[in-house]
Structures are given as C-alpha cells and as structure tokens.
Image (cartoon, helix red, strand yellow):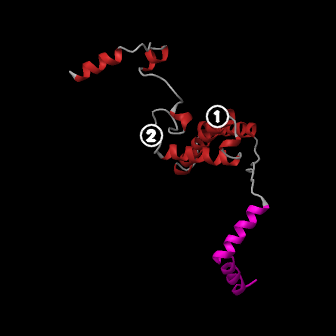
Amino acid sequence: MKHVARKERLNGRKNKPSQSTKQYGSKLTGRSKITNGTHLLPRVDGRSIWARRLRDLITLHVNDYGGEGNISEAQRSLIRRAACLTTELELLEVQFATNGGAKTWQLDKYGRAANTLRRLVQSLGLERRAKEVNATYDQFSEDVERLRETGFIDALNDDRDGAAP
C-alpha cells in the first residue's frame, strides 16, 4: 500500500523519460563511474587479478606522464588501451611459459598486440615526464631546520661517522 502511494506521488512529477532512460532503464545524470574513478570498467569486479594489474599499470603510466593534472583526456584514453594491451601480453607470456613455448598463431597474435602497444606508447611519447616541483629555497630551508630541531640530521651524521667511507 505504501509502495503504491509513493509511486503515485513520484509519478506526479513532470520528468519526461529521455531516450537513454528508455534504453537503460534509469536516469543518466552526472558523470559515469569510470569518469569519477569509482569503477575501472562497467559491470566488472575490480578485484580480479587482471583488473588490479590494469589499474596498477594505468596509475604507473599516468605518473610517468606527470600525474593526473598533466595529461589530457585523449592521453588518458591511450594510457588505458596501452595498459590493457600490456596486461593481455603478460597473460600470453604466462601461457607461453607454462606450455613450454608458443604456437605460430599465438606468436602472431602476440607480435601484433606488441606492435600495437609500441605504436600507442610511441604516440604518447616514450620519455618520462617529471612533475613540476614548486618548492622554494625558503621552504627547503625550513624543512632542513625542522629536521635539525628534531635531531634527525644529527642522527644521520652520527651514523655516517661510524660507517666506512
């Protein structure tokens, strides 16, 4: 009874179903869970070995290119594809190792995936980019002084005095 009354009350609203609502059955508002960073892939449990490795590789690649704030959305997309190919190539390598080698068709598949990965990474730029550090000399001096006050730097010097050069 309560459920029917609530449903009637909600139906009194003037929200018209959109095409996406008709197709997916729910209202699509805001950003997707992938964009928000709460899901790696839609309807995929992110706790599997494959998903964890993919997430790790994405994080490592993003850090190589200067962090989240320094990459474009296009670069993020290419990084995801490169991480996925790397994960799949690693799985193929495990198969090769456990089966005592690869068959010709497996090597062909592996070679094509490796070449695609190379082109993706090449289009991103193979060099690692440093993060911009905005520390000033004054901030650095304050940090050193704080370490001296706590005795940390003196302890380091004492340890070095007893060590062989």
95 part of magenta stretch: no
Going 66% across and 33% down the picture, which residue do you hit?
A: 73
Q: How crowded is mark 1: few (under 14 residues within 10 Å), some or many (20 or more)?
A: few
Residue furthest out toward the right: 137
Tell me the chief SS of the magenta region.
helix
Is 36 in front, or is 116? 36
* Residue at numbered disc 1: 77
User: Relative to 58, does residue 22 appear above or below in the rendering?
Assistant: above
Q: Quadrant of the C terminus?
A: bottom right
- The local secondary structure at tag 2 comes to loop
Q: Earlier along the polypeptide chain: callout 2 or callout 1?
A: 2
Q: In which quarter of the image is residue 139?
A: bottom right
User: Relative to 17, does residue 158 appear above or below in the rendering?
Assistant: below
Using the image, tell me which numbered label, if any, was put on residue 60: none
Segment colored magenta: 137-165
Is 89 in front, or is 72? 72
Q: Could you say where residue 55 lies in the image, as x and y percent from the top left?
A: 56, 44
Going 55% across and 49% down the picture, which residue do you hit?
A: 94
Tell me the kind of residue under disc 2: Asp
Q: Quadrant of the N terminus?
A: top left
Is 15 in front, or is 21? 15
Using the image, tell me which numbered label, if any, was put on residue 45: 2
